[in-house]
Amino acid sequence: MDRRRVLFALAGGLVAAAWLPRAWPQRSYARAEDLYAALREQPRQSLSIGGGTLDIVFADGASGLDRERTLAWIRRSATAVTTYFGRFPVRRVGLLVIAEVGSRIGPGTTYGFDGSAIRLHVGRGADEQAFASDWMLVHEMTHLALPVLGEQWAWLMEGNATYIEPIARAQAGQLAPEEVWRWSVEDMSKGQPAAGDRGLDHTHTWGRTYWGGAAFWLLAEVGIYRQSQGKHTLQEALRAINRASGGNGADWSAGQVMEAGDKAIGMHVLSDLYAEMKDKPVQVDLDGLFRALGVDMRDGRIVFDDHAPLAPLRREMTRRR
Ligand SMILES: [Zn+2]
């Protein structure tokens, strides 16, 4: 309780005293320092997954939240990123779970500057279905894998989490391959450059950041596969970037990310693609890419063509590990 509120309550007498306890909100932990303090000071329980330790704090006890269900969801999400990256992407992360009114899961935010940490808002009314269909936590945990970059490279980080999240869930058997492609087919066009666009490093709209960034990683996926004739994958490059950086506790440039990925596959696909897209608007031939991968949408359903030239890549991307 802050000083102003105490004074107000005293001045307001009985009316304020009656009002205050009911209206007192759940602390939001919106400031990063409050998040880190809660992770340090409140009771925690730890999960070990994929070589990493997850220290979980239920903020202020998170009364009314189903802890077992929440922990199962955290474990499932951690398993998905562990499957994709070959290990949990950081040695240690703190998760602050904040109970909210309603039945929504999210939002979530990931930090790295004072140790890896994720803040999660979870509705007390969230049911089994809401937890099972959640993508947000796998998205946040994917952020742990890459180094933190400056603001002009938000597209690289957000695009990566947007692109990898459904693939990671599919590889862990948590999402059907058809569903991996649904969002991309429906929404990736929102990442195309509009009039006045000055390239990914200089155009910070929502569409360019999330879907423009995701399109970059899809192009990287296809580029690595084509140029190496199927010998190397983006997954291999991203695992190498994760190992070299140690995850989101590191502070890198986009150039360093591309270099570390390229080094792992012995090519320069990532650096070339970055040089091409960073300073100018590049329209991506999404229809052509989806056709080559054998992905189509008919009557609201995703259908696959196994004779498409990149069908082997598409199958490999979502193969159950
Ligand atoms: Zn994100």
Image: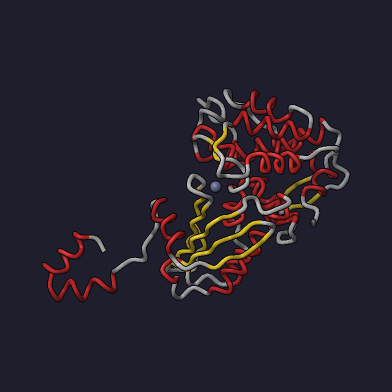
Percent coordinates x, y for residue 116 in the rendering:
54, 50
- 196 shown above or below 8: above
Residue 205 seen in this snapshot: yes
In the image, residue 168 sits, relative to residue 291, either above or below, namely: below
Specify the color scheme: secondary structure
Image quarter in which the N terminus is found = bottom left
Left-right relation of 260 to 212: right
As rendered, which of 150 and 175 lies closer to the eye?
A: 150
State the image quarter where residue 171 is shown: bottom right
Counting every numbered tag in the picture gives 0
Q: Residue at x 66, y 43 (%)?
A: 242
State the image coordinates of residue 300 (x, y, percent, origin top left): 69, 54
Q: Quadrant of the C terminus?
A: bottom right
Q: Name the residue nearer the viewer: 184 or 106.
A: 106
Q: Does residue 209 appear in this view?
A: no
Q: What residue is rendered at 61% in x and 45% in y?
A: 247
Relative depth, front residue between 59 and 235: 59
In terms of depth relative to the viewer, which is nearer, 236 or 52?
A: 52
Task: List x then y, in percent, for residue 104.
Answer: 50, 64
x and y, in percent, of residue 90 in the image: 62, 50
Horizontal placement of 310 versus 105: left or right?
right
x 80%, y 53%: residue: 319
Task: Spot the residue most to the right.
Answer: 307
Q: In which quarter of the view is residue 216 placed?
A: top right
Left or right of residue 318, residue 250 in this image: left
